[in-house]
Structures are given as C-alpha cells and as structure tokens.
Image (tube, rainbow, N blue to C red):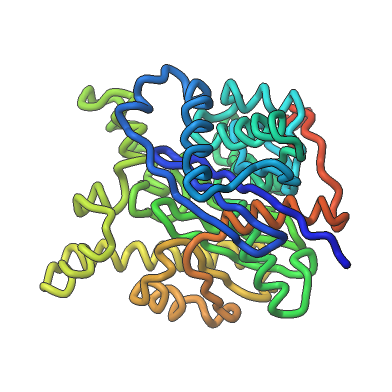
C-alpha cells in the first residue's frame, strides 16, 4: 500500500497568513488567518513577526485539534532570495539567512521559509519553498532594456502561473516541460509571461512598473513623463514609488480597485470608468500578443488565472482579442496552497530532486567587450 504524506503549506501575506494541511494532494484543512494591523506595525522588521505569526498559526490549528507531530513537510511560499530557477528548494542556512534579511525584497512572503523551518525544527519533517517570487528563468534577450545600466527583471507570479501550467498539462495528458504557453495572472497586480518547455523565459515585471495597468499598479508608463513628475517637487520618492506599485492603475484613475464597484459605475453610464476598464482589458490582451511573439507564435494555449479571472466581462474581452492565437483556458482564482503542497510532494515521492539554494543568482550580468 502506497504511503500517504502529510504536508502543511504556509503563505504569509501583508495582513494575513494562509495555512493549509494536505494529505498528499487532498486538502484536509485551510484557513486564512487575519492579523491585527496595529499589532504588525509594532514590529520594526518583517522577520520580527516570526514568533507572533507562529503563535497565531498554532492557535488556529489548536482550535481544530490539529497536531503538527508527524508532518512530513512544511512548505512556505518563500521570498527575498536571489534569482533562481523554478522548483522546490530545501530550506538550508543560506536560504534562511537571505529570507531573514530580505536579501532582494522585503515582503511578508519572506516569513514562509522561516516558518517552515521553525516548525520543522520543533516537530520534525522537511522544510521547503516552492517556485518563490524570485524565480528567474529569463533568456538573455529578455533582459536587455534601452539603457545600459538597466536590465529587465523577472518579477511576477511564478507559483500560481506554474501551478496552472501543470494543471493544464495534466488535463491535456501532457507535461508542463513539453508545452509552450502564454499565462496571465490577473489580480491586484497583473503579470503576463511566456513559458517555453517548463521555463518562464520572459514576462512582465509586475513589481517595478512594466506590463499592463492593474487594479493597484500603474504598469508601463512613458518614462520621460515619469521623470518630469519625479523632479517636479510635488512628490517624494516614496509617494512616486507607491503610485507606481500600490495605488496606481484602477485606483489612480477611478479611486477604487473593486471591480464590482467599477462595473456598477459602468452600468450606470460612467463613460470614463468604461474607458479605463476597457483599457485594462486591451493592455492585458496586447501583452499576451507580445509574449506570443516570444514563442514565435507557436503557442499551445493561453491560460488566464488569478482572482480577476472570475470576472466574465474581463475574461470575455481578453478572449475576443487573443483567441486567434491559441485556445484560451480559464483557471479562475489562485492555486498557491495546492502548488506549495504539490511541489513538496513531488520531492517526497521521488518525482523530482529538491534543489539546493546557493545564494548565487542565476544571472550576474553580461560581459562587455
């Protein structure tokens, strides 16, 4: 009789922590634990939240009489790491150190690996991260920008994108590593990427101002206009950064990122709300078309995922513009918890080898002669 594995997936966010207990691929328990915003502000650094979040998780599990003894693997989202290839990584000391200090980015996701390791130290089992936000599989051509000092970076939603890619491949009786896909993650941030044979070879930088506008992010902007804003004296560096990464897009135009509210305004005859929302659809479709050219038009499917993929108006609008390229398949919502558990399970069952985090980025710049 085949052994069954028990896994705890951990996904820390800005104001909550998601946890889910799995037996193999079957979810036994899931919770999205909200945190007191005022309590979080008491911590100087994100990593200082570790004991607090650990205590909250244990309390939530205790309510359901769930014990962590005998868990085979604790798997966190990860973050704050150097650019790395996709896959499942065991949490070693180098990875743990980079997560603690937020080596490349400071986001609550850096607590994922720390919590996984903390629980593994106490209860046994392995500690992993799977397809963290730092996945960087860009081809050299994709890194070049129009300025010699600036290179394009891989910053998107690799965990969810690779999860739906694997899901689609399984449905087609194929393997992710055999397919060429364009995938759009549609959420508060929007990322579009070209996947060639199991690697994200190019994509929009959803963090640093690239790709389509999004509910909370500005997307690509005319650079000279941004320069003039930066030197106008009207805005601080932090204010400009927030407008691009947190309060841009639909919020900047319409004062809200709530799609239902925007659709109600459109239904009430708000012409500008319709124009901006149609621009969101237009820009997403345009980027899908652009990344189809990265794959030289040989696209097996276009996959739409993320929370906004529940919204029919948006999905239909995108589909109408891109379905000539390849079949469009919708995976509405996020599959991050399932993806974390599945990544650890592939290692535990011997389908994959756990990767070793070296702390050395996969790309270290170009040699210039």
* Relative side of 218 to 125, left or right: left
Near-viewer residue (67 or 260)? 67
Q: In the figure, residue 128 lies in which quadrant?
A: top right
Residue plotted at (74% across, 66% down): 176
Q: Position of residue 125 (x, y in %)?
A: 76, 40
The quarter holding residue 35 reads: top left
For the point 34% across and 48% down, the residue is 216
Give residue 337's position: percent from left, percent from top.
58, 54
- Seen in the picture, residue 80 relative to 85 is either above or below; the reply is above
Q: Quadrant of the C terminus?
A: top right
- Where on the picture, by quarter, is residue 366? top right
Is any part of residue 139 visible from this angle?
Answer: yes
Which quarter shows the N terminus?
bottom right
Picture residue at 65% right of the left edge, 29% below the top: 118
The answer to whether residue 345 is left or right of residue 219 is right
Q: Position of residue 198 (x, y in %)?
A: 75, 59
Residue under the image location 65 percent in, 36 percent down: 116
227 on left or right of 13: left
Residue 160 to residue 146: above or below: below
Foreground pick, 224 / 304: 304
Q: Is residue 42 left or right of residue 275?
A: right
Identify whether 233 is placed above or below 350.
above
Outermost residue, front side: 65
């Amino acid at each position: 009789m085949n052994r069954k594995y028990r896994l705890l997936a951990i996904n820390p966010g800005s104001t909550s922590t998601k946890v889910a207990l799995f037996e193999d691929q079957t979810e036994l328990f899931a919770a999205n634990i909200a945190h007191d915003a005022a309590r979080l502000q008491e911590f100087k650094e994100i990593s200082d939240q570790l004991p607090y979040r650990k205590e909250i998780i244990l309390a939530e599990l205790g309510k359901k009489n769930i014990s962590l003894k005998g868990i085979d693997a604790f798997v966190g989202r990860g973050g704050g790491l150097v650019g790395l290839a996709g896959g499942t990584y065991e949490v070693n000391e180098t990875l743990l150190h980079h997560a603690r200090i937020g080596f490349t980015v400071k986001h609550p996701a850096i607590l994922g690996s720390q919590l996984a390791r903390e629980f593994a130290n106490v209860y046994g089992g392995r500690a992993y991260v799977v397809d963290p936000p730092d996945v960087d599989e860009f081809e050299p051509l994709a890194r070049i920008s129009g300025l010699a000092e600036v290179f394009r970076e891989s910053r998107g939603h690799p965990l969810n994108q690779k999860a739906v890619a694997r899901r689609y491949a399984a449905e087609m009786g194929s393997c992710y590593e055999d397919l060429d896909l364009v995938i759009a993650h549609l959420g508060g941030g929007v990322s579009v990427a070209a996947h060639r044979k199991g690697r994200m070879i190019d994509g929009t930088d959803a963090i640093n101002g690239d790709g389509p506008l999004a509910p909370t992010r500005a997307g690509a902007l005319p650079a000279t206009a941004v320069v003039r804003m930066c030197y106008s004296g009207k805005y601080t560096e932090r204010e400009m950064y927030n407008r691009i990464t947190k309060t841009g897009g639909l919020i900047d135009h319409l004062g809200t990122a709530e799609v239902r509210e925007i659709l109600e305004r459109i239904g009430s005859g708000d012409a500008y709300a319709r124009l901006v929302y149609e621009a969101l659809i237009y820009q997403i479709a345009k980027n899908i078309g652009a990344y189809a050219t990265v794959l030289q038009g040989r696209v097996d499917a276009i996959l739409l995922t993320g929370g906004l993929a529940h919204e029919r108006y948006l999905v239909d609008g995108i589909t109408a513009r891109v379905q000539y390229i390849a079949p469009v398949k919708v995976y509405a919502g996020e599959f991050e918890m399932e993806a974390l558990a599945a990544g650890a399970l592939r290692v535990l069952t011997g389908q994959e080898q756990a990767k070793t985090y070296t702390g050395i980025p996969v790309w270290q710049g170009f040699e210039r002669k």
